[in-house]
Image (cartoon, helix red, strand yellow):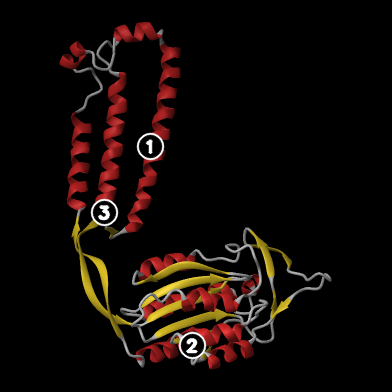
Amino acid sequence: MIQLDEKSYLYLLSIIPVMVVLFVLLQIWKKRTQKKFADLGLLKRLTPDRSNFKSTLKLIFILLGIASLTMALVNPKMGTKLETVKREGVDIVFAVDVSKSMLAEDIAPNRLEKAKRLVSEIINQLASDRIGIIAYAGQAFPQLPITTDYGAAKMFLQNMNTDMLSSQGTAIDQAIELASTYYDDEEQTNRVLFIISDGEDHSEGNVSNAVEDATNEGIRIFTIGVGKTKGAPIPLKRNGIVESLKKDNQGEVVITKLNEDVLQEIADEGNGEYINGENTDEAVEFIKEQLNQMDKKEFEAKQFAEFKDQFQWFLAAGLLFLFLDIFVLDRKTKWLKKLNLFNER
C-alpha cells in the first residue's frame, strides 16, 4: 500500500505537457526559419554533426527529471507489512438520504451537503469503530461495507449526490432493512444506525415493521434531521445556476419541510434518539457522548504498518536524468554515428 505525504506538489507535473507543447512549437518554428535561410540539404552539409534525435533525447531527460523530483517532493511511502491489530469499537452504519428534497437550501449550503458534513464530523470523532455507508432515495443502495478505513468512507461520502439513484422518494424502510445486512459480527452487541434525512417518507413500505425487525437484531436507530420545519422550495440547477424550482403535477412549486415527527417516531421505536442537525457542533458532541457510553466490542483489523519513505529513489533518479541532460550534446556522438543506431545520415 502506498501513501503520499505531500499531494499538493503533484500540480508541478502540469509543467510537463506545457514543455512538450513548447518544444513542438519551437521545432516547427526552427524548420520554417531554416527554410527561409537556406536549402535543407545545404544546411545538413554545413552542419553534418548536428543530431536531430539528441534534442528530443535531452527533452525526455529533462521531463523525466522533473517528474522524478516532483515525486520526491510528494514523498511516497510504502507499507511494507500487513499486520493484524486488536481494536475495540461499535459497528456504525450511516444511511444518508439522497432524494431531491435534500437539495433544498433552507439550511446552508443545502440539506445534502449539511448531511455529508455531519457524517464527516462524526467520523472525525471516532477512534476504532467500524463504519458503513448507505445511500437511499426511492430505494436503498450500499455505498461502503463495514470497514475501519475512514479515508475511504469520506471519499465515498463526498461523491454522494441526488443523481446517483434514479428512483425518487424516501424509502426509509428499505434503508433500515439494508443496514441490517451490514452487521457481519454476530457477537457485536452494540450496533448503531444513523439515519440522516429531512424525514419526508414517500415509500409504500412499512417503516414500523422495519424498525421492529432491526431492534430485534440489537440495532439502535438514531435519526438526524436536516432542514427546517417551515420548508423551502427545491432548486433545479445546471452548472451551479438555478434554472427553475421543482413543481408538482399541478404546476405548483413544491415546498419540502423537515418532518421531525417521523424521525422522532423512528428513533423512539428504535431505542435511539432524535437529533436536530442544524447546529453541527452540538449534534456531533451529543452523538460522541452517546457512543462513548456504549460498551465496546473487541475485533481484529488488518492494516499496513512500517510505512517507509521512498523519496530518496526519486531524488536520485531526478538528479541522474538532469546530469544526463547536461552531458548529452546536440552533436552526433562519433562512435554512435558509426553504429548508426538512430538511422541518421
Q: Closer to the N terminus: mark 2 or mark 3?
A: 3
Give the left or right position of residue 122, taking residue 208 as reference: left
Amino acid type shown at disc 2: Thr
Residue that badge 3 annotates: 73
Which is more foreground, mark 2 or mark 3?
A: 2
Give the left or right position of residue 285, taking residue 201 as reference: left
Q: Closer to the N terminus: mark 2 or mark 1?
A: 1
- How many numbered discs, if any? 3
Q: Are marks 1 and 3 in contact (CB under 8 Å)?
A: no
Residue that badge 1 annotates: 19
Amino acid type shown at disc 1: Met
Q: Closer to the N terminus: mark 1 or mark 3?
A: 1
User: Few, some or many C-alpha atoms within 10 Å of disc 1 (few <14, some 14-19, many ≥20)?
Assistant: some
Q: Residue at x 42, y 69 (%)?
A: 145
Q: Position of residue 280 (x, y in %)?
A: 49, 83
Q: Position of residue 65 (x, y in %)?
A: 26, 40
Residue that badge 2 annotates: 215
From this view, report whether residue 165 is shown above or below residue 174: above
Front residue of 317 and 102 = 102
Q: Residue at x 61, y 75 (%)?
A: 171
Amino acid type shown at disc 3: Leu
